[in-house]
Image (cartoon, grey):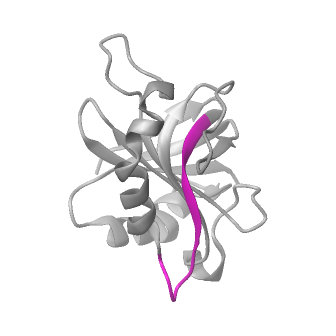
Amino acid sequence: MEINAIKLPEIAIIGKAGLCTKERNIVMELWEEANSHFEEVAALAMKEVDGSFIGFWGAMSDESMSFMPWSDNFSRGYYLAGIEVSKDVEAPMGWTKWILPERTYLKVLVESGEYTELFDEIINKIIPDRNLRLSGAICDYTEPKTSKNYLLCPVENI
């Protein structure tokens, strides 16, 4: 399992947001909405020197919008399906902009089909075994250059 500790500055993301619940998880709907209208924000996205996008984010926050973990056993909270932008970019009408706080994350590679099991292992084993605690909402991150998917878990020492 590939796990790295990284410190990230504030991250600005523009995307499609909505409330997910145990009864109605709308993550896939938000991605479909964002992808089907991507041309509206593509020019605003941050890019690498080679022109590839910096990153696609499935950012998460609790209902107070303080970017803390979801409630109800990680099944209830806001999700933002979007792309990384610079902090000064305005969100077009119909889009939402979030600025994630600067944090230290465990960056964990997600292999195809193992998301739920890996999420549970991170929360129940990896974080506690490293004498850490979850300090915010976990985010999904896709690296466009490699198409690799990661869980970014904000952590701090106990």
Residue 98 part of the magenta-drawn span? no
In the foreground, 43 or 74: 43
Residue visible at 58% across and 81% down in the picture: 73
Q: Position of residue 95 (x, y in %)?
A: 58, 48
Q: Nearer the viewer, residue 80 or 120?
A: 80
Q: Nearer the viewer, residue 37 or 8?
A: 37
- Residue visible at 42% across and 58% down in the picture: 33
User: Left or right of 5: which side holds 158?
Assistant: right
- Work out which quarter of the rendered image holds the C terminus and state it: bottom right
Question: Height in image: 112 above or below 116?
Answer: above
Q: Is residue 4 above or below residue 111?
A: above
Q: Is residue 87 above or below residue 97?
A: above
Q: Residue furthest bottom?
A: 23
Does residue 113 appear to the left or right of 57 in the view shown?
A: left
Tell me how many marks there are: 0
The residue sitting at 42% across, 32% down in the picture is 42
The percent position of residue 18, horizontal first and vertical second, equals 58, 66
Residue 7, image x, y percentages? 58, 32
Magenta-tinted stretch: 12-25
Q: Position of residue 125 (x, y in %)?
A: 46, 67
Compare residues 104 and 132 and report the one nearer the observer: 104
Residue 19 lies in the magenta stretch: yes
Majority SS type along the magenta span: strand
In this rendering, is residue 139 above or below 22? Answer: above
Taking the view exactly as shown, the residue that stands out farthest to the top is 49
